[in-house]
Image: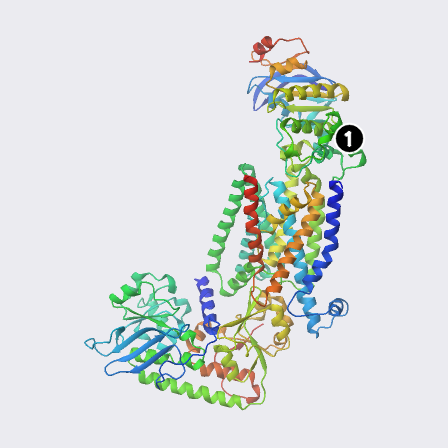
Amino acid sequence: MTVARKNKFILLSLVLLFPIVCGLHLFAGEISVSFSDFWNSLLNFNTDNTSQTIIREFRIPRLTMGILAGGGLSIAGLFMQTMFNNPLAGPYILGINSGSSLFVAFSVMTGIPFLTSNIGTISSALIGAFIFGLIILSFSYLVKSHISLLLIGIMLGSFTSAIVSILQTMSEPNQLKLFTMWTMGSLQQVEFTELPLIILFFIVGISLSLFMIKPLNALVIGESQALTLGIHVKYVRLALISITAILTGIITAYCGPIAFVGLAVPNIVKMIFKTQSHLTLLIGCFLIGSFFMLICDILIQLLESTIHIPINALTSIIGAPFVIIIVLKRLA
Amino acid sequence: MKTKHIFYSIIFISILFGCSNNTKKKKPVNSNSIVKYAENFSISISENYIDFQILNPETNEVEKKYALVKNDTIKVPEGYTPILVPIKSVIALSSTHIGMLSKLDVCKLVKGISNHTYIHEPSILDRYKKGEIIEMGEENSIPVESIIRSKSDLLIYSGFGKAFPHQEQLEKLGTICLANYDWKENHPLGKAEWIKVFGYLTGKENSASIYFKIIEKDYLRLKKIASKLKSTPNLFSGNLVGDIWYSPAGESYNAILFKDAKGDYKYANTKGTGSTENSFEQIFSDNVNTKYWFNPGVESKKDLLKSQPKFKLFQAYKQNNIFSYTFSGNEFWERSAIEPNHVLSDLIRILHPELKLKNKLYFYRTLSK
Amino acid sequence: MIDLNEIEIGYKKRLFSIESIQLLKGKVYSLIGANGAGKTTFLRSLQGNIAPIKGQILINNTEVKFFDRVKLSQTIAFVNSKFDGVDYLRVSDYVGLGRTPYTNALGRLSEIDLKIVENSLTELNIKHLSNYFTTKLSDGERQLAAIARAISQETDIIILDEPTAFLDYANRKLVMKEMRKIATDLQKCIIISSHDLDLCIESETEILVINKKTKTLDHFIANSLSKEKLIEIGF
């Protein structure tokens, strides 16, 4: 079997597996619901029926956010890794999440009604992610070493968390509480009625991503080589940062900062597909990223009766050792 | 400072809920008549001193023994720390301490507090502004110098099973440290009974005892009224922290109050004096049609929805039956421990409008828009 | 192919001038000069990255500064002195990147593109390596792959920046031989900057040398110059 065919086969299997994992996730919760509740909740929703409400208002948004957060952050991580030519890059470690956090903190704590509204929070998260993306981009021109750039990202993170904690001391307890809740991270903040807008954002982000495949493939062999292949590297970088900001920003706005998914998943995907074809990697990142997130969340729900694990904690527990493995593998 | 506010809120929430899931039944060590409800201290009269012992809430063993003496020539037995009473000055680090001192009208003894932004008591605030009271900061990071500078006889802190930092040196320099476990008392009257400790320390033991009798009587009267009622409206309590909902466990302070107010608390049968954890989905399916929701930790429906938009699906939300005490947070923390009758009165009034009680709500309000 | 008439090359300060040189298809030019004489600046000027201080660089009678990025990439291919390979990047995919200037917005390779890639690999006798990861090749193989990528770019001009600097003797000879062959077979104009005077003379390439005394770029046809003379002019 050729590589391309093998990869197509893996992708196809993942696509077929997708509804199964979604199904497992939908029905993993402690409260048992039936399949007919599921259909009724979508087609024939009765607001007085608790099971239907649980499916529609709790499970479906949670499932959707799991898919989008896992898939979106992984794609953002893939972009960062190719763009900075650095397998340890990712939106979280480079401080792009911190940008969102900082701006969300600002907007929540100003107490200005527009800024504390949903749209305000999302725009803040998007702008923050974009600005911090630009900052890390400009630093990437100054430092050549991979590790230096990561250190700068981590420093950006420390810097913003310092500013955020100063902001916290100045804010009203109520606003502080809201912000603290937000930083804990959750897939459950979204309402059913908000899903279309979020999905729309994602479709825009992912559609734009498709046009990045060609430049990404070329960027793999370095920026200067990509230039000689006719790629407008400058615009491409801006476009990549923008898409990353859309994907990371909207996830961060709704789910809080989620660590390590964007870093770990693209590496897993490359190990599985053993290719640098970004079409394959993009689809792979979306699918495996979603799986990663959903399986984490299924685990959380299954363990609920014994222990409550926040989603952030679980992704970090799995993701952080993974970073160490990659570092060790690089050194070897 | 506002971070501290949150920090304290968390501490206070744990005060309300109790921190442990400790399920063992505790019995007072000695069955003297001075202490009736409280489980974490004992007081008995000896020949020439008052034997006052702090009991560790986790182990139920004696943590520290004090001998309250009227003059310092009296010899105290081995293992006892003497406290010369009435004390002349005190550092009171928790709101409940201030509340109890205020009830005994001895706020003038206070020389140090934790943070003035959590204080309601006007006389304390007044003296803080005049510079007569030192602000010490958070309990775990108080500079020793401030304590020494205040030249206080006594420092009362919320006990966590450990000695106060630098306790030995402080006591050598004349400031005795006293762990207060009122926040670990599960029975509302047990919490209130700590006023007796303050009474003996300040020489106001008689006032304390009379005051306690009054609130005890009132509490039991209200409880009796409630017990005769037919209706037991259902209720739930707490809020999400992250994705986890903490409800007071069945043997906790809040659960006892709910029961005494004749409310049907959803988790009344859970074990433990601390809190019980549930997933949001579980809480929703248990309580979507529950009538009352207490202690959501916010003041407005707007803030409630901002923290989690799905709250609007709850019946309690739709029917405006969410009640919170946070409107006057500081006042609540100072007074609720020592006025359990008023907390109970609030709950009964809310749960049983059919009684048409005349008095107003003391602490609770329904959430604003 | 490339017309260089009355040009001054330099970036901020003038490095050397060119009176009149024409670079033609089917030939390999070795660019020789001391360090700092301006080899890199010259190569970058040819690619339109740096404007000459004076005069115009004409490629197929059009001034190079009017080329847009895509047109440029369809005209000039560039090979670095070293390609380290990339994890999980296979030789065939790497050579396929040469088709980037021609593919659609999604970068998908057509049957024709794949055929061109295959031909490039065949041209350099590395077709057997096409499924290898670029990280698993020897230095020489990797440089051949880089050249194959440049060939698949189907440009009239290929510029190589010291392509043999990191190779052993056998591989240097091989690369130069291949370049000669490509120039003739595929009718390309190939410019190679190099420090290796022996190799340039041995490989019978045309010589472009930056004259140290006159600060001019001098053109010598193949086999017209001894190593000693070359050193005298350039160093």
Q: Position of residue B188 (x, y in %)?
A: 45, 80
Image quadrant where one finds the C terminus of chain A: top right
Location of residue B310 with respect to C22 vertically, above or below: below
Q: Position of residue B155 (x, y in %)?
A: 32, 70
Q: Secondary structure at mark 1?
A: helix
Q: Quadrant of residue C234?
A: top right
Residue that appears at 51% across and 44% down? A151
Number of other residues with Cα within 10 Å of mark 1, as a class: few under 14, some 14 to 19, many 20 or more: many
Location of residue A183 with respect to C179 vertically, above or below: below
- Front-most of residues B104 and B302: B104
Q: Residue furthest front?
A: A1
Q: Is residue B109 left or right of residue B251?
A: left
Specify whether residue A103 is in view: yes
Location of residue B231 with respect to C58 vertically, above or below: below
- Front-most of residues B108 and C124: C124
Specify whether residue B338 is in view: no
Location of residue A217 with respect to C228 vertically, above or below: below
Look at mark 1 in the image and give the residue it sits on. C116
Q: Quadrant of residue A270?
A: top right
Residue that appears at 75% across and 27% down? C122
Q: Residue furthest left?
A: B73
**Chain letter of disc 1?**
C
Mark 1 residue type: Ile
Q: Position of residue A111 (x, y in %)?
A: 54, 61
Q: Residue furthest right?
A: C111
- Front-most of residues A271 and B170: A271
Image quadrant where one finds the N terminus of chain A: top right
Q: Is residue C18 left or right of residue B103?
A: right
Q: How many marks?
A: 1
Q: Position of residue C227 (x, y in %)?
A: 60, 10
